[in-house]
Image: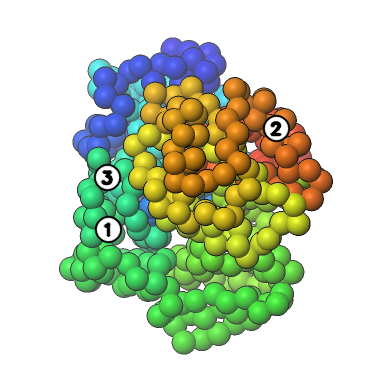
């Protein structure tokens, strides 16, 4: 074996390919075919694309299928704390040893062909899913869709969540252009689930051109919450489930849960959907998505990093007022359009704590502080490091307030790395009950 540890393998992958973002399907398809990861014997496949919400849809789809008794593989990205989070078998993160075995097989098969870090991950997921003989593999697109690594597999069901402006340098500068990239995961004649009320016309046109069986949120399916009851509407039929966890489910989280249910229905694997199934599935969520951790003070972790996602964060804060101050620990990437973010959050944050991130793309904390003050935000108190920010936030929020961590995956990850108790609580929610009981 080339390397003995996961850390060594990941360091090797980071330096192997000369271009970190190299969108093409040729390399990965070639290696996948050498490994026999496509064609006959491939498990049923769900692929989910979208600007926001795809992590929640993939995680909840996998949880629903697993609650139905199926053997399920889940591939998501990026991870928050451990690389192993990206590849899960029935909710359990892949072990270091399993990942190393998968990487060795991929390394042998690629020969002199280089692969990107993400391509290694996608192939490792498929390799481990085949070894585990999963019934369904649920794959989250990393970037775009048409040229994303997971698109070498043919989706039995494709899903497109909310589409908005993000990663414009690679995907385009309008919802229509970006929507066309997302729609590239569709396959002719196969089901497509559209998880927003008004998808770009380019998405609708592509589905029509491929004669896909298209189901749309608000037209063909919907999920409503009435006290502790979930009301599921699917193609004219209605089912109600009494689920205590339904209370508080709203906004994008509700739409994403509906989208996951529609994916399961479209797969034809809904025979066991029940209140118990829904309750088990709702207990599993990807960490860092409007994730509340009880305090005091309470903590809210959200990887929101674009205008659409921050608008959803603002909606949640308005609907869930705090008795004490709301303190934000925030860091953002310099290449993001931030003006709409600050506008949506105006009046919802009492104290801002810009935190430093050791990343070339990150906006320096001092620049962020100046920007916040320039747009009229008060209570801006930059921190010298994350430990100082954590202490400052907890003291400012007090026993009645809350601390909100947002701005990017990197922001949430950096904070959790410095707060082990918060990290353990956040990751525990993303595991099924059985895995928590086993100490996974």
Considering every residue shown, the one lying at the far left of the view is 209
Left/right of residue 439 with respect to residue 413 in the rendered view: right
Q: Residue at x 22, y 64 (%)?
A: 202
Q: Which residue is mark 1?
A: 175
Q: Which residue is mark 2?
A: 392
Q: Which residue is mark 3?
A: 168
SS of the residue under disc 3: helix
- Spatial CA span between label 2 and label 3: 35 Å
Q: Is residue 95 above or below residue 201?
A: above
Question: Label 2: few (<14), some or many (≥20) within 10 Å?
Answer: some
Which is more N-terminal, label 1 or label 3?
A: 3
Q: Residue at x 43, y 77 (%)?
A: 218
| Dot 3 and dot 1 residues touching (CB under 8 Å) | no
SS of the residue under disc 1: helix
Q: Is residue 178 above or below residue 142?
A: below
Residue 122 % position (x, y): 40, 37
């Amino acid at each position: 074996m080339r390397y003995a540890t996961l850390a060594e393998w990941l360091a090797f992958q980071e330096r192997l390919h000369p271009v970190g973002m190299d969108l093409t399907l040729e390399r990965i398809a070639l290696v996948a075919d050498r490994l026999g990861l496509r064609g006959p014997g491939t498990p049923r496949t769900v692929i989910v694309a979208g600007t926001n919400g795809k992590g929640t849809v993939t995680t909840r789809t996998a949880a629903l299928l697993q609650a139905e008794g199926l053997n399920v593989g889940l591939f998501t990205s990026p991870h928050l704390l451990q690389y192993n989070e990206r590849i899960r078998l029935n909710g359990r993160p892949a072990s270091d040893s399993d990942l190393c075995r998968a990487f060795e097989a991929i390394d042998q098969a690629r020969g002199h062909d280089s692969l990107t870090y993400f391509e290694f991950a996608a192939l490792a997921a498929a390799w481990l899913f085949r070894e585990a003989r999963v019934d369904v593999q649920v794959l989250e697109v990393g970037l775009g869709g048409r040229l994303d690594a997971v698109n070498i597999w043919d989706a039995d069901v494709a899903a497109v969540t909310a589409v908005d402006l993000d990663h414009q340098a690679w995907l385009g500068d309008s919802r229509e252009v970006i929507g066309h990239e997302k729609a590239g995961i569709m396959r002719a004649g196969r089901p497509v689930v559209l998880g927003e009320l008004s998808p770009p016309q380019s998405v609708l046109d592509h589905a029509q051109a491929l004669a896909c069986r298209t189901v749309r949120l608000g037209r063909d399916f919907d999920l409503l919450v009435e006290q502790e009851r979930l009301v599921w509407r699917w193609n004219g039929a209605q089912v109600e489930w009494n689920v205590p966890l339904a209370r508080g489910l709203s906004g994008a989280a509700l739409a994403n849960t509906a989208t996951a249910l529609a994916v399961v229905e479209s797969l034809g694997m809904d025979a066991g959907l029940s209140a118990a199934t829904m309750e088990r599935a709702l207990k599993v969520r990807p960490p860092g998505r409007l994730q509340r951790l009880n305090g005091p003070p309470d903590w809210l972790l959200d990887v929101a990093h674009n205008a659409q996602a921050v608008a959803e964060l603002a909606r949640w804060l308005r609907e869930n007022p705090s008795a004490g101050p709301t303190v934000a620990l925030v860091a953002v990437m310099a290449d993001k359009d931030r003006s709409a973010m600050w506008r949506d959050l105006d009046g919802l944050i009492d104290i801002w704590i810009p935190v430093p991130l050791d990343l070339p793309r990150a906006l320096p904390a001092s620049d962020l502080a100046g920007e916040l003050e320039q747009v009229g935000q008060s209570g801006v108190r930059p921190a010298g490091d994350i430990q100082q920010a954590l202490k400052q936030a907890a003291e400012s929020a007090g026993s009645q307030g809350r601390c909100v961590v947002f701005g990017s995956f990197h922001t949430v990850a950096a904070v959790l790395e410095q707060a082990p108790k918060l990290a353990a609580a956040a990751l525990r929610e993303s595991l099924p009950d059985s895995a928590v009981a086993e100490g996974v």
